[in-house]
Image (spheres, helix red, strand yellow):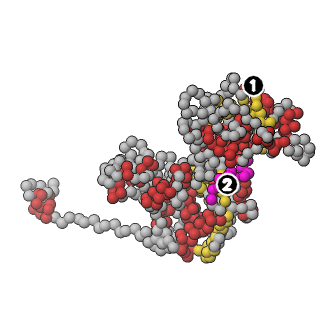
């Protein structure tokens, strides 16, 4: 048995009884020393492998802030685009971006980071034009020589900066070229950037793909394996143009598509401009010229400009809205695939001009208009007379079309006869063609004679200026009063595409009041339609007269 000493008993009673709290307060508290701060790792010579490292490297050594808020549905922020192309390094990727969103700048930044981290890396950047190539060069120069973060800049990684590229200390090189048949025949490189592909000839773009080739690992030279990567960036100006077709491929799953419009890079709208909240609609929103786009959000969601955190000034965007057409503004700044100012029929839309009601009507004449040549285009249409409603006019129903390339006149004639039999039973057919078809070719017989030998009699439509025929066609597309008077059946896909893509000529930066030439196959179908209308309306759409018309040379 062990007896407790007075001292031990006193120690055992500590913390007990009515004075226990007071005793506890008098006891000194143990203070845990703060942990020593972990020194921050210098990432200057470390290749970023995570999103956090990548963001920190850019902040430390360039000071660049990339907007990271996607405010439009189905769009991505510039940071999402950049992170994906740099860290994931896709085999092929397409970036649809608005003007001023930084497509070229981000492409240059990705090029710089890849080049400085991978010794002996080669990159080729092809711009849709020489001016576009120079723009990429300026972006690369600014990143390396003018931008600095809290830990300085990165100009030391560049050995030599040239007007058409750069050479790095580690042996990497970047060359910037304008897209041309000769520039795409260069050496194989693992990284290829194609900028403004909508302005690039499709054949040149496809040939450029052959330049991109992955690199095997080389332990002796301490070079890692590098997969080939092609990044294509552009706005989209033309319906069914190069960029539009690439977008269709991307949406079908061929390669990833990243989209960012001007709202993804727009500065945040301050309360001084919008008025007090709390939103989603602010007191001064209705006064803003771009509110129709900014407020195009789901119910209960804040306006786009209240969620963005970019660099593009709101005043600059309002300026663009006021000085450009709606079509150009939506195509250039909102990434909406609409017709550009180059379109000859800008008001032609599928919703207004394409309908299944444009079917063959028994009892009405069928007009077959043929534009012959290497490309042969033809349309079948009927003129539906004006009804009893005051102010209405004739309407045109196109129920069939035909397009071929490189076929003989006899083969085309047989195909057209088959279509006539299928679609209108060959009833009341009036066939016309370009007067040039009555000229002898190098072999001898005229085109009209060859069609006649195949059983299709073609009569030349009246000689007239191309602009007059297009104006006649446009009067049905966009009548001064009432709804559109041109209706095309959905089965006529080539003609619908031709109406969307037929464009004006451009000289010295100015759009002219004449069509671009050549623009096959669109012109072959449009020319056939305008010629057929001219055959029915030889003097234009004038009120009918009961007087008999005779040529002027037969009056006297």
Residue furthest to the top in view is 363
Residue 275 x, y percent position in the rendering: 32, 54
- Magenta stretch bounds: 510-521
Which of the pair 142/447 is nearer the observer? 447
Q: Is residue 75 magenta?
A: no
Question: Gap between marks 1 and 2, in whole Å?
Answer: 39 Å
Q: Going by the image, does 236 lie left or right of 22?
A: right
Q: Residue furthest right?
A: 444
Identify the residue position indicated by label 1 in the image.
427
Q: Residue furthest front?
A: 556
x 67%, y 38%: residue:
493
In this rendered view, identify the residue nearer to me: 280 or 274.
274
Compare marks 1 and 2 and give the one earlier in the sequence.
1
Q: Quadrant of the C terminus?
A: top right
Q: Is residue 369 above or below residue 513?
A: above
Q: Is residue 309 left or right of residue 383?
A: left
Q: Which residue is mark 2?
A: 505
What is the residue that sits farthest to the left in this orientation?
18
Q: Is residue 193 among what the camera can see?
A: no
Residue 228 position by quadrant: bottom right
How many labels, in total? Answer: 2
Please name whichever residue, 292 or 3, is drawn nearer the observer in this view of the structure. Answer: 292
Report helix, strand or loop for mark 1. Answer: loop
Position of residue 127 measured from the top left corner of the image (x, y, whole percent)? 64, 62
Residue at 29% x, 67% y is 33
- The secondary element bearing badge 2 is classed as strand
In front of the other: 291 or 299 = 291
């Amino acid at each position: 048995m062990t007896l407790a000493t007075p001292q031990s008993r006193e120690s055992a009673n500590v913390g007990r009884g009515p004075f226990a709290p007071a005793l506890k307060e008098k006891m000194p508290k143990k203070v845990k020393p703060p942990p020593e701060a972990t020194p921050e790792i210098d990432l200057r010579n470390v290749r970023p492998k995570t999103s956090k490292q990548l963001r920190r490297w850019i902040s430390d050594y360039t000071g660049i802030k990339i907007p990271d808020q996607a405010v439009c549905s189905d769009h991505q922020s510039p940071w999402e685009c950049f992170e994906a192309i740099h860290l994931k390094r896709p085999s092929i990727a397409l970036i649809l971006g608005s003007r001023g969103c930084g497509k070229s700048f981000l492409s240059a930044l990705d090029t710089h980071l890849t080049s400085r981290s991978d010794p002996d890396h080669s990159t080729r950047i092809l711009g849709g034009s020489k001016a576009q190539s120079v723009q990429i060069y300026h972006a690369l120069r600014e990143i390396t020589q003018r931008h600095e973060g809290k830990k300085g800049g990165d100009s030391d990684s560049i050995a030599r900066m040239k007007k058409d590229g750069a050479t790095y200390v580690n042996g990497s090189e970047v060359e910037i070229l304008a897209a041309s048949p000769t520039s795409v025949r260069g050496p194989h490189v693992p990284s290829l950037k194609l900028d403004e592909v909508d302005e690039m000839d499709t054949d040149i773009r496809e040939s450029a793909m052959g330049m991109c080739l992955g690199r095997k690992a080389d332990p002796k030279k301490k070079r890692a394996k590098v997969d080939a990567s092609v990044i294509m960036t552009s706005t989209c100006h033309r319906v069914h143009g190069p960029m539009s077709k690439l977008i269709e491929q991307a949406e079908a799953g061929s390669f990833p598509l990243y989209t960012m419009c001007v709202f993804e890079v727009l500065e945040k709208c301050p309360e001084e401009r919008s008025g007090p909240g709390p939103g989603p609609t602010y007191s001064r929103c209705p006064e803003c010229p771009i509110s129709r786009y900014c407020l195009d959000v789901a119910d209960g969601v804040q306006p786009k400009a209240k969620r963005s955190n970019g660099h593009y000034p709101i005043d600059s965007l309002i300026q663009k809205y006021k000085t450009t057409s709606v079509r150009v503004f939506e195509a250039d700044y909102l990434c909406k695939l609409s017709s550009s100012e180059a379109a000859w029929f800008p008001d032609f839309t599928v919703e207004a001009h394409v309908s299944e009601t444009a079917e063959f009507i028994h009892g009405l004449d069928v007009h077959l208009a043929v534009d012959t040549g290497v490309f042969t285009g033809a349309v079948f249409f009927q003129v539906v007379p004006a009804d009893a409603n005051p102010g209405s006019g004739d309407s045109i129903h196109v129920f069939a079309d035909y397009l071929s390339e490189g076929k003989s006149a006899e083969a085309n004639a047989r195909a057209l006869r088959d279509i006539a039999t299928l679609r209108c039973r060959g009833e009341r057919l009036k066939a016309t063609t370009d007067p040039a078809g009555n000229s002898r070719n190098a072999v001898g017989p005229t085109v009209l004679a060859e069609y006649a030998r195949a059983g299709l009699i073609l009569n030349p439509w009246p000689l007239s200026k191309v602009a007059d025929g297009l104006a006649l066609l446009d009067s049905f597309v966009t009548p001064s009063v009432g709804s559109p008077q041109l209706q095309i059946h959905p089965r006529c896909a080539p003609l619908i595409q031709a109406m969307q893509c037929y464009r004006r000529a451009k000289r010295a930066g100015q759009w002219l009041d004449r069509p671009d030439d050549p623009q096959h196959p669109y012109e072959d179908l449009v020319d056939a339609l305008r010629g057929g209308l001219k055959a029915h309306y030889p003097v234009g759409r004038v009120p009918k007269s009961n007087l008999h018309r005779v040529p002027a040379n037969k009056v006297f």
